Amino acid sequence: MLNFEEMHTRLPPSYRYLIAIALFLIAFFLRFMMAPAQENLAYISFYLPTLISFYLLGTGPGILVTILSGIAGEYYFVKPFEVLFSAQKNYLPLIFFALTSCLIGLIITRLSHYSDELKHAEVREKFRSHVLELITKSAPLTNTLRAIILWVEQENPATRGSIMLLDTDGKRLLATATPNLPGFYVAAINNLDVGEGIGSCGTAAFTGKRVIVEDIQSHPYWHHFKELAGQARLGSCWSEPIRSTQGKILGTVAIYHQYTYQPTEANIMLIEQAAYLASIAIEKNHSEVALKKNEERWRFALEGAGDGVWEYDFKTGKTEASPRLMEILGLNANLPEDIERFHHWAAHTHPDSITNTMMAIQAMKDNNSDRYQIEQQKLCGDGTYKWLLNRGMVISRSSDGKPLRMIGTSTDITERKQLEVELKRQARIDFLTGVSNRRYFMEQAEQEIQRTSRYDTPLSFFMLDIDLFKQVNDTFGHKSGDIVLKRMASVCRETLREIDIIGRVGGEEFAILLPETDKAQAAEVAERLRSVLADEKVPTETGAPIQFTVSIGVASRVSSQDNIDMLLNLADEALYQAKKYGRNRVYIAMQ
């Protein structure tokens, strides 16, 4: 059976209203067959189809069934027709039925929609973390791009996505990730020319701008492809160019909808995020492919490859550098002080890299290896550090087998390392608020609990929830709700200490860990934080600022047996009590 989300995204409005009318007719027939003359039971049989219509089909079809049921209840289940307009006619059953069915139906609709939003948010975060993990682990590019499209498609079952990459000449688009588009359609659009008016993707790649086509059948860009799109049951298409960090066009991300459709702000944000993730994956792949080619072509690279060449003397411990390597490190090959500075490798190697370097050199001295490959941070002329991939081979040994000379190359991998650091950071933070996501917060909390147990120091937890946050979304819109969440996280960071750990563990629910903080101190901090947030005003596009309050539950470690699950459960129960007793308050867990 179709669920709430599927009925609302896969079926056009006309189909949903037809289903609603069918539900009413079935209920009417059954009611008429059972007891057509019993007026008091006239409405009861219509409650079920009415509520089903609200749940599966939405507010409009639900209200339609309510109206039809009301008419049926009045016109078909009273004896004489003219009694309807007499003074003796009692309309209370009709009023009661209309009010209760609409009220219950609207509540069901909102609860179902809210439940779907929570499930979507959880699935969205899992997909995003999976994509970032694939990028970090250097998975095959096609697998990563396919995961990005599946992440896009899970947002709405009525959509299909594709990622097309430019060929080496930059004149054609290759269908690289199209997991759920029909095979005949993929075959037809593969090797698509880049140019204005050539579909959505060809135009987006040519102009470097987003292209939104709400109706494929009537848009001039799709003149030569509209029959093909009709066979594939594609009604609209939005295409976003994928750019490198230097602004170069790498390809396009496209989202197709089954029907004529105008993208929402959330749809636009989704396609932008997909293009951003695809850009990271493509650039990282290009970098790794280039590095691999360089390794295969230049085992001991020459200057022409752009890498630096060096030679190490095992007796003196000095390293000679080529002009290119000196240039990479921002040193002057003509200055004696810079040359001497480079000779002694330990002087320009980051302390974190020295141990691994020494171990690799010792392995060669012990005849355990002839090859040397290590990633190091090297000090540059401007005082900063660069990451270098150093690869070498022993080319000379003494008569007793001891290494004498080693020659090798250095490749600047600073950008790649920075990208890896950024990917790891993104995998740990909440995309919207910038605080720790649930998984990383729990990891940090577990480590802090262990440290606390080891040194027997105090520790406290907050569970914090924005009061009536659903009303903020309903009144001002989800965009304003997101702004409130970001501002609240920002205020928490400004108010709390640097050592305090903040994590978003639910939609509007945050957890905060306070090391070195006992119950009395935690209560004081919680009250101060609550007060600051209550005075906060978040500006909106309409001009009227949003004010909000929070409820905070506090739990503190009182014995060495207290673990993270116990403390979080206590803080969560305290949060429940804070809301129970009026919200906008702090409640301390009883321990």
Image (cartoon, helix red, strand yellow):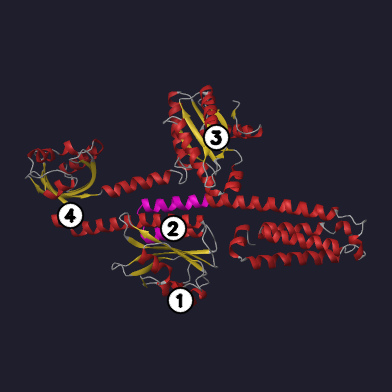
Looking at marks 3 and 1 on the same chain, the residue that comes earlier in the sequence is marked by 1
| Nearest-to-viewer mark from 4 and 1 | 1
Q: Amino acid at mark 1?
A: His
Number of disc labels: 4
- Please indicate whether residue 563 sits to the left or right of residue 175 in the image: right
Looking at marks 3 and 2 on the same chain, the residue that comes earlier in the sequence is marked by 2
Which residue in the structure is indicated by mark 2? 148
Q: Report the span colored magenta.
A: 122-145
Work out how far the residue at label 4 is from the one at label 3, CA to CA, in angstroms. Answer: 54 Å
| Residue 463, numbered circle | 3
Question: Circle 3: is it few (<14), some (14-19), or many (20+) Cα within 10 Å?
Answer: many
Q: Amino acid at mark 2?
A: Ile
**Residue 47 in the image, given as x and y percentages of width and height:** 77, 57
What quarter of the picture does the C terminus occupy? top right
Identify the element where label 1 is drawn: loop
Question: Circle 2: is it few (<14), some (14-19), or many (20+) Cα within 10 Å?
Answer: many
Q: Amino acid at mark 3?
A: Met
Residue at 77 percent across and 67 percent down: it is 25
Residue 306, visible in the rendered structure: yes
Work out how far the residue at label 3 is from the one at label 1, CA to CA, in angstroms. Answer: 56 Å
Residue at 55 percent across and 64 percent down: it is 158
Which residue in the structure is indicated by mark 1? 223
Residue 258 vs 121, above or below: the answer is below
Question: Circle 1: is it few (<14), some (14-19), or many (20+) Cα within 10 Å?
Answer: some
